[in-house]
Image (tube, grey):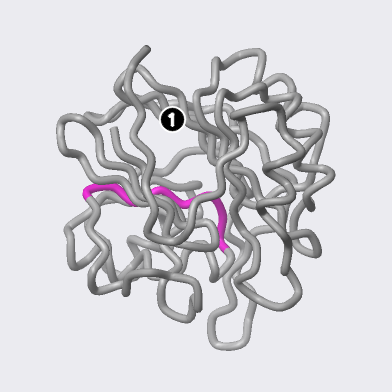
Amino acid sequence: MQITYHGHAAVAITTKAGHKLLIDPFFTGNPLADISASEAQADYILITHGHSDHIGDMVAIAKRCDATVIAMVEIAEYAASQGVKKTHGMNLGGSFTFPFGRVKMVPAQHSSSLTIDGVARYMGLAAGLVLTIDGQCIYHAGDTNYFSDLRLIGREHLLDVAFLPIGDNFTMGPEEALLAAADLNARLVVPIHYNTFPVIEQDPESFAQKLPAKMGKVLQPGESITLEKS
């Protein structure tokens, strides 16, 4: 399995069988994105919550690629209303097995809305995603504050990789993310959601260095890691 970071919270996964997943596809308007929305490929698009820097180019990519949108029910319904043909709505605590693997929606402490014509539209609750693919377990926290129940996610799942926001202002910052990393106990922790805008400027290398040896991994936009079943 190959995992590629595309800046902000956008993460792409290609499974051994060739399924292409795209999480929080924010490319247009993202100064850190290494590719454009027209270059992104996906069979499945997974969304953590409704803010524009996470829904991003969901509709355009789903239509072009005939991809299935997997998201909170309100987001799935919104995608369908915009002409996306394939959607799968979920909710917190729920899981479903897709052709590529299993998806479980877990809590995140954050808001979720999308401004349309100047009006904020409710997009359901914010979520994190636990993905079990090719014998590996991946956690994408989306946008969240630190909260003590993160330790339950770490207890329930043997996480191989955890993608954690460190930007502060809108999400937890580096110090809280260190607490989250300790609770989750993932083999590898990758910081996300930083430096896209001035208000979330952080030093990801400093964060990674404060983690236990070999746990922290800073990915530059366009950089990939390969996971093999141990």
Toward the viewer: 218 or 65? Answer: 218
Report the magenta residues as a range: 43-50
Seen in the picture, residue 33 relative to 77 is either above or below; the reply is below
User: Is 108 in front, or is 181?
Assistant: 181
When asked about the image quadrant of residue 58, the answer is bottom left
Residue at 26% in and 41% down? 14
Instruction: Tell me what residue is drawn at x 33 percent, y 68 percent.
Output: 59
Name the residue at 42% across, 51% down.
11
- In the rendered view, tell whether residue 109 sits above or below residue 117: above
- Dot 1 crowding, Cα within 10 Å, few <14, some 14–19, many 20+: many
Q: Residue at x 59, y 53 (%)?
A: 192
Q: Position of residue 199 (x, y in %)?
A: 76, 74
Q: Is residue 133 left or right of residue 55?
A: left
| Residue where numbered disc 1 is placed | 131
State whether residue 223 is above or below residue 158: below
Magenta stretch encompasses residue 46: yes
Number of labels in the image equals 1
Which quadrant would residue 37 be assigned to in this image?
A: bottom left
Q: Is residue 113 left or right of residue 36?
A: right
Q: Amino acid at mark 1?
A: Leu
Does 207 sit left or right of 31 as displayed?
right
The secondary structure type at the circle numbered 1 is: strand
Q: Left or right: 159 with respect to 221?
A: right
Quadrant including the N terminus? top left
